[in-house]
Image (cartoon, rainbow, N blue to C red):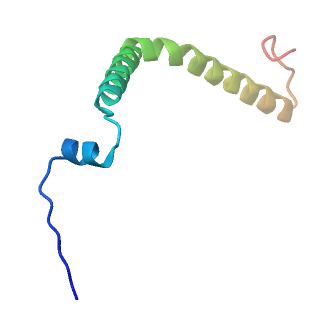
């Protein structure tokens, strides 16, 4: 035996019938909060701000790497270390 029941109702009517809470106000508030947070994060993604944040650290790392390489090469070749490599 096979029984089929078709119920034609909106999601709001089904929630009310089943006694489920209306979460629409909470969803609206959360979406607004997410939108505000996304807008604030997009301001931080400005290319100029990103370059100011990343560039000094990147250049310092390159300079340190160069100093280390020069000191290793000069000590391997039997040379005396330069002023920058003495520490």
**Image quadrant where residue 33 sits:** top left
Residue nearest the observer in this picture, 43 or 3:
3
Q: Is residue 10 above or below residue 65?
A: below
What residue lies at 63% left-to-right and 17% top-to-bottom? 60
| Image location (x, y in percent) of residue 50 | 44, 17
Corner quadrant of residue 57: top right
Residue 26 coordinates in the image, percent (x, y)? 35, 27
Q: Position of residue 51 (x, y in %)?
A: 45, 16
| Direction left: furthest residue | 8
Q: Residue 71: x percent and y percent? A: 79, 26
Q: Which residue is drawn at the image coordinates 30% and 26% (left, top)?
A: 25
Residue displayed at 62% across by 24% down: 62
- Image check: 63 left or right of 1? right
Using residue 50 as the reference point, say whether residue 12 is left or right of it.
left
Report whether 65 appears left or right of 49. right
Give the image quarter of residue 22: top left
- Screen quadrant of the C terminus: top right
């Amino acid at each position: 035996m096979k029984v089929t029941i078709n119920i034609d109702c909106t999601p709001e009517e089904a929630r009310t019938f089943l006694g489920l809470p209306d979460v629409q106000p909470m969803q609206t508030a959360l979406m607004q909060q997410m939108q505000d947070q996304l807008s604030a994060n997009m301001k931080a993604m400005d290319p100029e701000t990103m370059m100011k944040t990343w560039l000094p650290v990147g250049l310092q790392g390159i300079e340190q790497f160069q100093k280390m390489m020069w000191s290793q090469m000069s000590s391997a070749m039997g040379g005396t270390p330069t002023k920058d490599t003495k520490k």
